[in-house]
Image (spheres, rainbow, N blue to C red):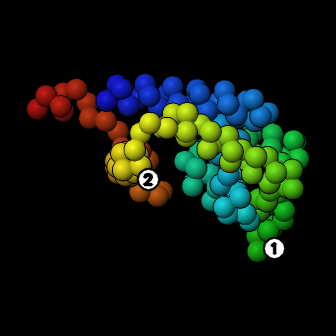
Amino acid sequence: MFQLVETSRLMRTYVDQRAREHGTTRAQWGVLARLRRQEGLNQAALAEQMDLQPISLARLLDRLQGQNLIERRENPADRRAYLLYLTPAGRRLVDDLDDVRGAIAQELLGEVGDEAVLSALETLGAIRERIRPPRGEDRPQPPLAADRMA
């Protein structure tokens, strides 16, 4: 288990470094990529999809808007909520980052066969679904030491 956690940490750090080379962060990159796939989301839906706290996402969105990479548009169906869209600059950046994503995949997985990568992704997806709580519920708490001994 430790190997999985350590590998995840190292990969996040590596991707963070590569993102910084392009004037962004891994978290901002994730938001831009998600919006490219689903423009017009509101902040609450985006936060839920990305497993982020709404306040953390709001700060990311403020930075992205300040960099002219996204825009918030009024939602005609709900005046209290905004819909999120990429600006042309945001679309160019996330499109350019596709090449970086491909390079990272080649650097880290180049010698690993496609079947092994697909198997690992399926396994990680299954683990993620076991950990992720049903919508609207809190994360499950790990058992207490006394419970594990019983």
Q: Is residue 57 visible?
A: no
Q: In this view of the protein, can residue 144 be seen by the observer?
A: yes
Residue drawn 44% across and 28% down? 7
103 or 49, nearer to the observer:
103
Q: Residues within 10 Å of mark 2 (few under 14, many from 20)?
A: few
Q: Give the side of residue 132 with respect to residue 32, left or right.
A: left
- On-image quarter of the N terminus: top left
Q: Residue furthest left?
A: 150
Q: Residues within 10 Å of mark 1 (few under 14, many from 20)?
A: few
> Which x, y percent locates residue 13?
58, 26
What type is the residue that disc 1 sits on?
A: Pro
Residue occupying image coordinates x 66% and y 61%:
37
Task: Identify the residue at horizontal 66%, vertical 27% (top origin).
Answer: 17
Vertical side of 31 occupied by 24: above or below: above
Q: Secondary structure at mark 1?
A: loop
User: Residue tagged by mark 1?
Assistant: 76
Name the residue tied to disc 2: 137
Question: Seen from this angle, which residue lies furthest bottom?
Answer: 77
Q: Are marks 2 and 1 in contact (CB under 8 Å)?
A: no
Label 2, label 1: how far apart the Cα atoms are: 29 Å
Total number of numbered discs in the rendering:
2
Image quadrant assignment for residue 12: top right
Vertically, is 20 above or below 101? above
Image position, residue 140 (x, y; %) = 36, 44
Q: Quadrant of residue 6?
A: top left
Q: Amino acid at mark 2?
A: Glu
Q: Earlier in the sequence, mark 2 or mark 1?
A: 1
Instruction: Give the x, y percent position of residue 91.
Output: 80, 54
User: Taking 63 as reference, is 43 above or below it?
Assistant: below
Q: Position of residue 141 (x, y in %)?
A: 35, 39
- If the image is split into quadrants, where does the C terminus sit? top left
Residue at the image point whose x is 36% and y is 45% from the top:
116
